[in-house]
Image (tube, helix red, strand yellow):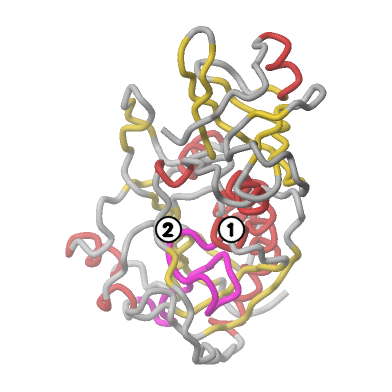
Amino acid sequence: MSDKPPVRTIFLCSGRLGIPIIDALRQDSRIQLLGIYSQVDKPVGRKKVIAPTVFTQHCLQQGLSVERVSSVNNPAFLEYLRTLDLDLLIVVSFGQLLKEEILSLPEFGCLNVHASLLPKYRGASPIASAILQGETETGVTFMKMDKGLDTGPIYQAFSLPIGPMENCGQLEWRLGNLAAAHLPTICWQVCRENLQFQPQKPTSAAIVRKISKTDGAIHWDKSASMIAKMVRAYTPWPKAYSFLPTSRGVKRIQITQAVAVGGNFGENTIPGQILPMQDVLGVACGSGCLKILRIVPEGRKEMNSADFLRGNPVTYGTVLSSE
C-alpha cells in the first residue's frame, strides 16, 4: 500500500467511450473522484425529447451523481474548481473546448483520452474515421491537453486490431475498455511517479470533423468496399441509409450490417440496382455488389434481410436512391 495520497481529480465526459473508464476509476483506491460532469441534457430524436447524454444515463443507472455543465470555461465553474485543489482533470469524449485557464488550473494539468493513435485522426470522429479509411489497427492515446485540437504531448498509447466486420459502436466499446484498463495507472504515474510526456510526431495529420446525419446517405456509384466501410463506420449512428421504392411508396432503409462482394453483374446493371440473390438483399455498386445482411426498415425494428424480404418482396431490377 502506497503512503502517497490518492490522485484528486474530476471527470468530464459525454460519450459512451467513458462508461467503462468511469467504472474503473471508481474502483481504484489510487483515484479520488471529486466530481463527475457531463454536457447538459438536450433534445434528441424526431420528437425532440429532452434527454441526458449516454454517459449521464449510465451514471444515473449506477446511482452516481452527475453534474451537467453548459460551459466548463464559465468563471463561476472555474472558481469552484480552484477550491478543490485538483491534481488532475480527466477529459473523455466530452464535446467542449477547454480554454487555457482551465487547462492550467490542476497541478498536473488536464489529461485527455483520445480514441486514436495520435497524431492520426485528431478531432471529433476518430473511431468512425479509422474504419472509413480501412485501418486495421487503432488505439487510445493518453495526452496532456494544450490549446490545440488534440495536439498535446503524449504520456502513453495502446493499440488494438480492428475486426474486419467490427462497427463503430463495437470498436468504441473495446477502446473504452482498453482505456479503462490503463487510465488509473497512468493518472497515478503522472501525479505521483513523475511520468514524462513526449511531443507528438511532426506530421500532416488530418483533422476529422463531427459526423452529421446526412453523412449516412449512400451513393451507390461508390465501390461496394467503400459502402461496406460506411455501414460499419456509421453504426450505431447515424446509420448508412438509402431509399427503396415499394408498392406502398418509397421507404427509407437503414443498413446496419453488410459485406462487399466483387464480380461483374452484367453490362446493363446500374449502381443501386437490386440483384437476384437468394435470401439476401444484394445491390449493385459502382464496382462490386453490397450484400445487405441486416437492416432497419422505416418504422420498424432491426432485422436480417432474409426476414425483410419474406414480408416485403422486392422486384429484381428495382433501383435504390440516396434521396
What secondary structure is marked by label 2?
A: strand
Per the rendered image, the range of residues in magenta is 106-126
Instruction: In the rendered view, tell whether residue 150 sits above or below residue 93.
Output: below
Residue visible at 60% across and 76% down in the picture: 188
Please give the label number shown on residue 158: none
Q: Residue at x 59, y 23 (%)?
A: 318
Inspect the image, locate mark 2, and give the three-letter code of the amino acid beneath it: Leu
* Location of residue 12 (image quadrant): bottom left
Residue 312 vs residue 215: left or right? Answer: right
Q: Please, what is the three-letter code of the amino acid marked with disc 1?
A: Leu
The residue singled out by tag 2 in the image is 12
288 inside magenta stretch: no
Q: Is residue 139 above or below residue 236?
A: below
Dot 1: what SS? helix
Give the residue displayed 44% in from the left and 50% down from the top.
14
Tag nearer the camera, 1 or 2: 1
Kindly indicate whether the residue at mark 2 contacts the one at mark 1 (C-beta within 8 angstroms): no
Question: Can you name the residue that lies furthest to the front here?
Answer: 267
Q: Is residue 149 left or right of residue 4?
A: left
Q: Residues within 10 Å of mark 1 (few under 14, many from 20)?
A: many
For image coordinates 75% across by 45% down, the residue present is: 264
- Quadrant where the N terminus is found in the figure: bottom right
Q: Which residue is mark 1?
A: 132
